[in-house]
Image (tube, grey):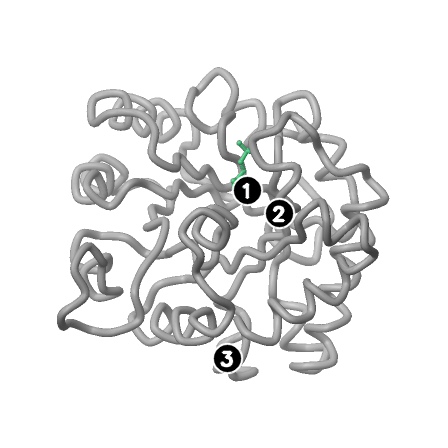
Amino acid sequence: MTNRARKPYIAGNWKMNLDRARSLDLIKTVKGRLGDGGDREVAFFVPSIYLADVTAVAQGSPLGVGGQNLWYEANGAFTGEVAPRMLREVGADRALIGHSERRHVFHEPDDWMGRKVRAALDNDLLPVYCIGETLDERKGNRTDRVLKRQLESGFDKVRPEDAHRVTVAYEPVWAIGTGETATIDQVDQAHRTIRKWLVQRFGEPAANLIRILYGGSVKPDNARELMAIDSVDGLLVGGASLQAETFLPIIEFDR
Ligand code: PGA
């Protein structure tokens, strides 16, 4: 058992990887291993085209299943987009918002983030709001400023009573998919900056319910060390979440 204020949250982000058969295999394997869940929350963020099949297989287990993105309107002329209620309809219970690749490859601006987080909450989806600085921003000593700006936009429409349903993922852009993990000190400092901002914004009781995950080249051999940092409540895992052999040891970081 862990002696933590917040339940550890280990999430896999498949991005645009795997196919239908391999996705379902992976869900079956993890579901079998998890049993009734208990002391940690485990979830996968799945390509929307596979959500209905994946949630059907995950049913009856504590596994969470989420979308990787959403648009904040309920319907309309938004070719290629997915509405929050559509994610709900195919069984998703959560969604990533503002992932680094959405921001940097698809140029999603800060000012969409508050509306996306709000739309998730209004549709009973648990948002994981992703933030993080680029290498240039870190080198220019702008990390704190960038994180605060991203927090301002994402939490713009969040009320203190919603706080417990929101998770923040700190993912330095330069550590995603690069094999380069932030140092313990860098992770701890960023997480403390985020926690401090949340406390100022929502007050201690509400802010203390919000989990802050680390993401960026999390692997079986660094998961334990990252989870040992007091300010880290969980992990958001990309590449290493695509196979049971690498994801299970991360879920079981303390065994
Ligand atoms: P990575 O991706 O673990 O492959 O670095 C993390 C993420 O983008 O969430």
Q: Ligand 1 shows up in which quadrant of the image?
A: top right
**Does residue 181 lie above or below 162 as drawn?**
above
Image coordinates for residue 2, horizontal then vertical, percent = 69, 43
The residue nearer to you, when weighing 111 against 10, is 111
Write the residue at 67% across / 53% down.
133
Q: Pointer 2: residues within 10 angstroms few (<14), some, or many (20+)?
A: many
Distance from Cα at disc 3 to Cα at disc 2 = 21 Å
Q: In this rendering, would 220 be left or right of 110? A: right
Write the residue at 44% across / 56% down.
107
Q: Are marks 1 and 2 in contact (CB under 8 Å)?
A: yes
Mark 2 highlights which residue?
171
Distance from Cα at disc 3 to Cα at disc 1 = 22 Å
Q: Earlier in the sequence, mark 3 or mark 2?
A: 3
Quarter containing the C terminus: top right
Q: Earlier in the sequence, mark 1 or mark 2?
A: 2
Q: Earlier in the sequence, mark 3 or mark 1?
A: 3
Image coordinates for residue 20, horizontal then vertical, percent = 20, 27
Write the residue at 35% across / 31% down.
31
Image coordinates for residue 62, horizontal then vertical, percent = 38, 44
Mark 1 highlights which residue?
236
- Does ligand 1 reach within 8 Å of label 3's beta carbon? no
Q: Pointer 3: residues within 10 angstroms few (<14), some, or many (20+)?
A: some
Please state which of the two labelled residues, at mark 1 or mark 2, is closer to the viewer.
Answer: 2
- Does ligand 1 reach within 8 Å of label 2's beta carbon? yes
Mark 3 highlights which residue?
158
- Does ligand 1 reach within 8 Å of label 1's beta carbon? yes
Quarter of the image for residue 173 reads top right
